[in-house]
Image: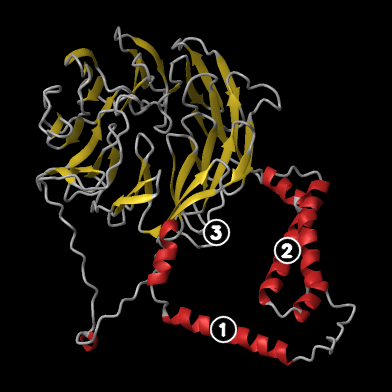
Amino acid sequence: MAPSTPLLTVRGSEGLYMVNGPPHFTESTVFPRESGKNCKVYTFSKDGTLFAWGNGEKVNIISVTNKGLLHSFDLPKAVCLEFSPKNTVLATWQPYTTSKDGTAGIPNLQLYDVKTGTCLKSFIQKKTQNWCPSWSEDETLCARSVNNEVHFFENNNFNTIANKLHLQKINDFVLSPGPQPYKVAVYVPGSKGAPSFVRLYQYPNFAGPHAALANKSFFKADKVTMLWNKKATAVLVIASTDVDKTGASYYGEQTLHYIATNGESAVVQLPKNGPIYDVVWNSSSTEFCAVYGFMPAKATIFNLKCDPVFDFGTGPRNAAYYSPHGHILVLAGFGNLRGQMEVWDVKNYKLISKPVASDSTYFAWCPDGEHILTATCAPRLRVNNGYKIWHYTGSILHKYDVPSNAELWQVSWQPFLDGIFPAKTITYQAVPSEVPNEEPKVATAYRPPALRNKPITNSKLHEEEPPQNMKSQSGNDKPLSKTALKNQRKHEAKKAAKQEARSDKSPDLAPTPAPQSTPRNTISQSISGDPEIDKKIKNLKKKLKAIEQLKEQAATGKQLEKNQLEKIQKETALLQELKDLELGI
């Protein structure tokens, strides 16, 4: 029987061992500590009942529930391990090598039967990228990329290729989660002026020009990340270039696309320019969160229509993590940021806590949906290595610091299947803890000697934007800056001058007619005294011009997107609105 709380596996220069999860945090007897620095890799099965690791000599599999060794394979160079979803197959990968005389190397990707320990099949897999075959959740289907094809195997019979998906220069593919019907998303990079594209197929319907469920093409894509939602109804595609030709960003340029299996597709419009740091689906599959924009970055939740649902404002963040049950969201700033976290209740959009995990390089939710693991690992950081277990209310429940002469390489939770841990009611009160919460010391800004005896003035490089539900409240309390006050006064003075000019005009005096060659919008701007009406007219004409351009594109035979067709349908309403405004003038 599985333990009541997930175990924690720790790998470092002190060896490989397991720790009992909350509330005990004692070393577990499930796995006797393996000392030394030889352990290169470990992995759990999807349900957490099996554990495999490589110690530089062999790859071993044990049963976590029975604490017994199941199999041992002679694979001293194994650096990647992965179990199939139902624990039937263990995939192992070793670096591919060729002999000095140039002859082909031996197969380096092995698939072992977990029950019998026999090798089912060996393949040559030269690259680490996408080394592991992808299984469907019921293991009926298994797929791997070979040159320009995706090969499909059925019922773990790797001696017969059941089906092939062939496209020119397939770079990546992702198999959908969930039960049948199985779907696959494939990415083909652009070449010679042709755009890159992502296509969705339903297995095994790959033949014919109309076989794809959906297709989305785009330029500016050197690589993509494809993210299926849990229900396999849509894919989010982060397309990125290595170089931003505008020079705006050192990290290249990113765009976010939405593709649904019903054929709909759209570009997700992000209100702030800059890099896309992270995009995550909620487990409900009905919404996703994106963290984007130049620092301080924005975070926004979008629905399946790609409309913003809630805006978290701006802050020092570059990652987002939904809890396993999807009711809590953590926005965090790790890596080159200070480790500030915001824990949000996404049902009510209320802030729960704001803990700080300084120097963290790793974050993971516990399968119970209540606890959080943060760690500082080598080689990303070689000092202050260790890990902390938090409650989402901000309390540190356990802390372990590695000795100064040692390193921590990897730490992770034992996985559990969905539904094992029920969702609990969210609490906002911090959970009591015996571990002190050490707030990091904030370094004070340097002040030149001439200013040291003068009062401190608060000035920020960036004005942070508050979350959507706090904007009005903060707007009332916060005084305007000097620049904002100056602009406000200018605007009020202009408005007053216009009103005076209108009142001074004689009512029986008609305005001077404009020459016939003058464009219509110039007439409306010259005779309208209300800047708001002028602005509306200008915007309407801009929209109508864009519609005319779309109609010209459609006339040339170009296939328009769904949102572009919707714009054209609005033309009559926009013309009527423009007519009403101009008549009102």
| Residue type highlighted by circle 2 | Leu
- Image quarter in which the N terminus is found: top left
Q: Which residue is mark 2?
A: 540
| Residue type highlighted by circle 3 | Lys
Residue 386 shows in this picture: no
The image shows residue 374 at horizontal and vertical percentages of: 24, 44
Q: Could you tell me which residue is drawn at 22 percent across and 29 percent down?
A: 6
Comes first in the chain, label 3 or label 2: 3
Q: Report which quarter residue 135 is drawn in.
A: top left
Packing grade of label 2 (10 A; few <14, some 14-19, many >=20) is some
Nearer to us of marks 3 and 2 is: 2
Query: In what element is the residue under mark 1?
Result: helix
Q: CA gap, disc 3 to disc 1?
A: 41 Å
The image shows residue 573 at horizontal and vertical percentages of: 77, 55
Q: Which residue is mark 1?
A: 492
Comes first in the chain, label 1 or label 2: 1
The image shows residue 554 at horizontal and vertical percentages of: 79, 47
The image shows residue 204 at horizontal and vertical percentages of: 59, 18
Comes first in the chain, label 3 or label 1: 3
Q: CA gap, disc 1 to disc 2?
A: 26 Å
Q: Which residue is mark 3?
A: 245
- Which of the pair 95/379 is nearer the observer? 379
Q: CA gap, disc 3 to disc 2?
A: 32 Å
Q: Report which quarter residue 96 is drawn in.
A: top left
